[in-house]
Structures are given as structure tokens and as C-alpha cells.
Image: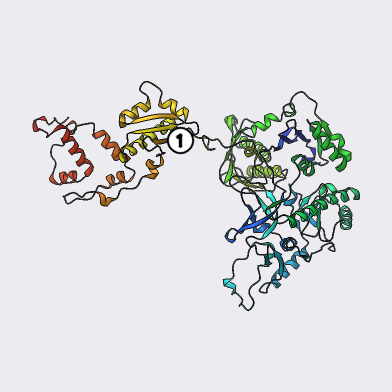
Amino acid sequence: MNYQQRLQKEIIINAEREDEVRIAITEDSHLVELFVETPETERHVGDVFLGRIAKVIPGMNAAFINVGLEQDAFLHFSDVGDSYETSSAFLAGEDAEMRDDDDEEEDYLVEEGATAAEQKIFRPRNERNSSRSNSRQSNGRAAPSVGKAGGMELRLATERPSGSKPIPRGQRPVPSLLGANVVLEPEHPILVQVTREAFANKGVRVTSRISLPGRFLVLVPFEPGIGISRKVFSVRERTRLRRIVRSLKPRELGVIIRTVAENKEESALREDLEKLLEQWRDIEKKAHEIPPPALMYRDPSLTSSVMRDLFSPDITRIVIDSRKMYREVMDYVEWAAPNLTGTVELFRGSRSIFDELNIESQIEQTLTRKIALPSGGYLFFEHTEAMVVIDVNSGRYAARREQELNSLKTNLEAAREISRQLRLRDIGGIIVIDFIDMNEERNKKKVYDEMRKEMRKDRAKSSVLPLTEFGLMQITRQRIRRSIAQSLSETCPVCGGTGILVSKMTIIGQIERWLERYRESSGERSVVLRVHPTLGDMLGKGFFSPILKLEFKHKMRIRLEPDESLTGDEFRFFSTKQQKDITAEFSAAGLVPVDVSDIDEGEGEDSSLDMEDMDERSSGGQLSSSLDDRSSTFDEDDFDEPESVGDDDRSSYDNVPKLRERNQRSENRSGPRKQGNRPRRRR
């Protein structure tokens, strides 16, 4: 008996609230998967849409499909299966020649995935060779017509106008990833199924391989044939199931036999197939009556889909805290697996079922960035735009002896916990793990083998690479739905999800620099400053408050107004005279660089501006304006002068307009300077 069979697997359903259903999957009382359904978290995986091709982008090997959602769906060319020809003919209302593989002696071997739309069919070798041969034979000839959809004729991608010359080999375009080399034309209708939920700013991902999952069978409308799960090992049982399904299914439809169908009676398979055929007939009717974009089929509720896909004989217990939900689950189990009705229980405790079974505390940990390890180390999760980075730290365990063994023990604990957290948080995409450094290669291999063993428990497809010389491990994990953090939380409106706020002193500095730019370019001396109330309290605090200091320094009237719609690091300036927002007009990004031609030239030989002065002027005038402000409050006599200044130096000195204007202002205030008033040079 392997490790997974020894696990005590349980399904805990919390449905006491009418607007929320939570389903927890536990292994030995450890939470490993969590599903949450609320009115705000609408699910689309498994839904079938009749869409319309919005645009085709060959450079991305993808097309965007209008399915009626907020964002267009993403269809990669690799997700356009060989059944596209049949699907197009079906939408055009024409009969297409169907391929029947029932005469093949080999079975289709399929991988049991999270959803039926993710099933991958492994065709027999002789059919794959035949398909390649047909593809080679069709190269360079006009392709047959597929049919009409949306009033336009569809043809294969290998078609070229009659009478045209063959394209030289070196000038031929790169082969497309489109299955069967079909052409996707904008505005054409297409039947697609959602395989991945929308996340961030990306829409749902879809495929043209339609599949309707049942308890024992999966109906594949456009790919005739029979597929059998790889986990059905008995040749005799595969033959029996294949014979039963061949006698039940229509010739033009395909069927995949799931693992749970093993040893089931023909009556159970027939009932399951009849339900699937009824669903498909409903889709057929809608597809010919409703114009695209439109929803053709919606996947069942969260509880029904979890019971359909996850309920199996290795589930030791199902606990439910709602009587209504308990009756629904019991009816399903009595039909699907009558011998397992004893595993379904109704929770009768006074406390919440998740509190009673210590699940609530584990859910709260999924929203934290730091996870403690048994030996004293900890994990730190960091989400970025491109990937998720996990840092493994030894913590207090690092102070002990035998560093290599301690690092190995912590890394092995981290590998097990990371695998669980990836499943629990439903993290997809690229994951990079920074393990504690180890010197021995055999220890690195132990960590790699441990991670691979733990990731085999995951239903989502994943790929694990060995540790690099820097101690980094790279993992890719299939993303099907939004992560738990995205489902249970929302982006902070203050920090925008960064977790970092600009300090209040930095914001006050930005306000002061804005006022400097405003006073230089505008003649108005009265503005309204709107900030968040917390920042407003700081600006107005004290007898000689920061806002009062700004008023005195810039000789302006500033009326401070709190505005809760602003974040803690935002401010808005409004003109009192014009009654409009002028913040962007005088921001650093909105300034126009100084034109050198507008600067007066001096009379000396060195008539060009010094580069440092030019940089100050072109950078927004911040530095030069601050110098002018300070010099305007002092007389020139307050500064020491060198003992002698040469003619060349004085000529260069006079040619700087900034300093020349300062001298002129000083003379206007104090009059001509007397030689006797010259201050002594400081020693």
C-alpha cells in the first residue's frame, strides 16, 4: 500500500450560510484544497459558449473570441483541435464526414484531469502515422471546403488560389500551430469551452475541444471514438467497458471512460450517458437558434462538480453541516456508489464545522506571506507579476550544529509544505523556490526527489526542475482558476497591493516642490490643497503647522481640505480663481524643458551657459528656483568676496544670467555698494 492510499482523505462541506459554500479537502487532518463559491466569485471553467472570432493574431499563435464576457476569451492555436472541421460544419448546419475509430483494436489512453475539458487523448500509433501521411499528401493542393458558417466559406490553411505557382521552400511561412491547419477568420462563429478562469487583466482561456463530463463517462461530441483512463489497468476490464460503451453511444460521438467506471454495471453507464446526450442535444438546439455570443451550457454547482470529480472510494468521510445539502449529496452517492453511503455524515455540533475540525485556522494561514515549519524555519511567499517566489529560511534552527544536515532537514520540510501550499492556495504559473544552500549533490537530489514525490499528489499538471547551482528550484503548475488569495481578498486601495506606503515627510516634500514650480509659472497666490484626512491631520498639527510654514515660505494662501477618496500618498491642488484641478499642470512630469535659444547671450568670449546650470534649468527648475528663493532674502554684502578676481573670471561670472539677475536685485534694494563697507575676509 503506497503513501497516498494510507492517507485519511475527507471532504468537509460548510454550507450554513445561504450566500457562501466552502468545501475543504483534507489529508490526515491537513487542509490541502479549498473551494469557495460566492455570488461574487462566478465560475466559468467547463462552461460552453457559442462565440464569434473577434481577431486573429498569427504572431501570438492565438485568436480572441467574443463570448459575451467582460473580456474576450483567449484561444491558442494549440487548443484548436482536429475536430474544428466537424465543429464548423455543425454550426453551418451541414453534415460532415465523421471519423469512427471503434474498429481499432487499441484503446485510447487518457489522463484523468481536473476537468473534462483538460483531458488529453493519446491516439494509437497507426492513426498518428496515418494523420501525418494525410497532412503531407495535402501539402500544395487546394483543400476541400469545410462548410459555411456565418455566411462565409471555411477552408483548410493549405489552400491556395488555382493556377498559382508553388512557394519556394525557403520562402514558405513558418507552419502554424493550428490543428488540422484550419484558417480562423474574424466574425466566424465558433463553439468553445472554458479551460481556465480569468485572472489579473487576462480573460478566460478556451478550447474548441468540447467535452461534457459525467460521473462515469465524458462525452466528446466532435471526436468519435472511445477513450479509457490510464488508471484502469486490467485488460479484461478495459475490453468489457469498451464493449458496453460501443453498444450504447451514437456512432458520430466520442466517449471517454473514467476511472470510477471500473467494475460498474451497464445500467449505471447507460444512465450516465443518457444524461450527457440530453445535455448535448440541448446545446445543439441552442446553437442553431441563438446568435453568438451566447452561453450554451453551464457547469453544475460547486458541490456537484466536486462530488463528480473528487468523490472516489479512497474518500473516508464526507461531513456536511446543512440538511438540504446533506440530502442532495446522499441522493447522489446512493446513485453513484451505493456501497459508500456510510461515509456521508451530517454535522450536528454547536460550533462551526470548520472551527470544530481546525480548518478555519488553516484557511487564515493561506492569506499570510509567512508559514512556519516544524523545525523552526519558515517560508516566505512573494507574488510578482510574472511569478511566485518562495524563500526558505532556517530561522532559529540555524544556530545548531551540523549545518549541512540542518539545511537538509529544513529543505525537506519546506518541500512537503510548499507542495501542500501550492495546492491549497491554488498557485499557478511559474514558481521559483530559494532553498537553503547545501554543498553535497546527494542532498540536493534528495530535496528534488521529495518535491517530485509530493507534487504527484496534485491533480493539476506540473513540471519540476532540479536545483541550480544557486540553490533555486523552478516549478511550473497548471493554472485553472483564480488563487485562493485572489478569491478571498481584494487589492488594497491605499497601497495598490504593493504593501508599501510613501512616508508623510516625502509627500510633504513633494507638495513643497509643487508649490515652487507653481509660484514660478503662475501669478496666482491662492490654492486649495486636498489630501487624505490622515495626511491633513499631520499638515495642520501644531501652532506653527507644516501648512502654515509653507504659506509663509512661498507667500501664498493655502486652504487645506480633507478628501477621503484620495489615498494616503496622493494630493490635489485646485486653483481658487479658475476652480479646476491644476495638479498635473505643474507636476514634474508636466514641465516643458527650457529652450536654449530663449536665453540671452553675454558679451564676453565665453557666452555659453555652464553645463551644470543648464542641467538645473532643464530638470524642472527645482534647484535654480530654490537658489533664487534663498538669495532673495539676503544682500550681496552678506557674502565674502575673493581678494582678487581676474578679467576672465569676472567676464565668466557676469555671463551667467542667474547670478547677474541676483546682483541687480541686490543693488536695487541696498543701492550702490560703498568701498568702505566691504566686509573683512574671514580667516
Q: Is residue 546 left or right of residue 390?
A: left
State whether residue 373 appears in this view: no
Residue 256 picture location, percent across and down = 80, 54
- In percent of width and height, residue 226 lies at 82, 57
Q: Is residue 380 above or below residue 185?
A: above
Judging by the rendered image, the residue that carries numbered circle 1 is: 570
Residue 455 makes an appearance in the image: yes
Q: Nearer the viewer, residue 471 or 363?
A: 363
Task: Establish if 586 lies above or below 603.
Answer: above
Identify the secondary structure beneath mark 1. loop
Which sits in the foreground, 203 or 320? Answer: 203
Tag 1: residue type? Glu
Q: How many marks?
A: 1
**Viewer-nearest residue: 216 or 681:** 216
Question: Few, some or many C-alpha atoms within 10 Å of disc 1 (few <14, some 14-19, many ≥20)?
Answer: some
Which quadrant holds the N terminus? top right
